[in-house]
Amino acid sequence: MDIKQRHFIRSSEIKEIISQIKKTYSQSFVDKIFPKKSKVERILIEHGDELIAINNKLSLWKKGKIYIPILSLLLEDNLGLKTIVVDMGAIKFVTNGADIMRPGITKIEPSIKKGNIVRIADETHDRILAVGQATFDAREIQKKTSGKVVKNLHTIKDPVWKFAKTFN
């Protein structure tokens, strides 16, 4: 991963980031990610993406306009993200970055709405494999028999995951 720039940001910039995050996530998510008096570092990487480290812990990936929680953070706490469970046959494809197809899904939280950021977990161990964005409401996903239903955003095999494991 090519790091272009790293710097700590002012509280006014933190407030702007929090404001952007609140458009996608709940207040409890924001409270867990940003404890009071947080020390926040912005890491600019290739393709115009950014990584956000909070109190020396890599926490968020700004990919385009979307803030995605880093998988290592989600392994400790699901942060209230809704879950889609995939069968064992889908694991290899999901971890390699493939979007989630309807036939591979075994369980869907009924409160998922189109555009929600969701965690993708395996059916046997409920281990998180990826973070995705729902392209349909849960009800619509249930009715479908084929096709892509979740866009894969971040997996346990992508460069950000590898960088997070070495981040200090």
Image (spheres, rainbow, N blue to C red):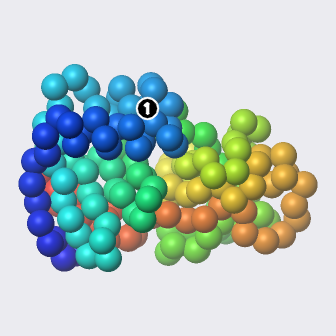
Q: Amino acid at mark 1?
A: Phe
In the image, is 145 to the left or to the right of 68? Answer: right
Q: Nearer the viewer, residue 65 or 69?
A: 65
**Image quarter of the N terminus:** bottom left
Give the secondary structure at mark 1: helix
For the question of whether residue 103 can be seen, the reply is yes
For the question of whether residue 79 can be seen, the reply is no
Residue 94 position, x and y percent, is 56, 68
Q: Nearer the viewer, residue 100 or 15?
A: 15
Asked if residue 101 is positioned above or below residue 24 in the image, the reply reads below
Asked if residue 158 is positioned above or below residue 117 in the image, the reply reads below
Q: Residue at x 36, y 58 (%)?
A: 62
Q: Residue at x 70, y 44 (%)?
A: 113
Q: Nearer the viewer, residue 67 or 155?
A: 67
Q: Residue at x 50, y 41 (%)?
A: 23
Asked if residue 125 is positioned above or below residue 39 in the image, the reply reads below
Count all numbered tags in the image, as a single digit.
1
Residue 25 position, x and y percent, is 50, 38
Residue 134 position, x and y percent, is 65, 55
Tell me the residue that label 1 is attached to. Answer: 29
In the image, is 109 to the left or to the right of 142? Answer: left
Q: Residue at x 19, y 76 (%)?
A: 2
Residue 119 position, x and y percent, is 54, 49
Q: Residues within 10 Å of mark 1 (few under 14, many from 20)?
A: some
In the image, is 141 to the left or to the right of 24? Answer: right
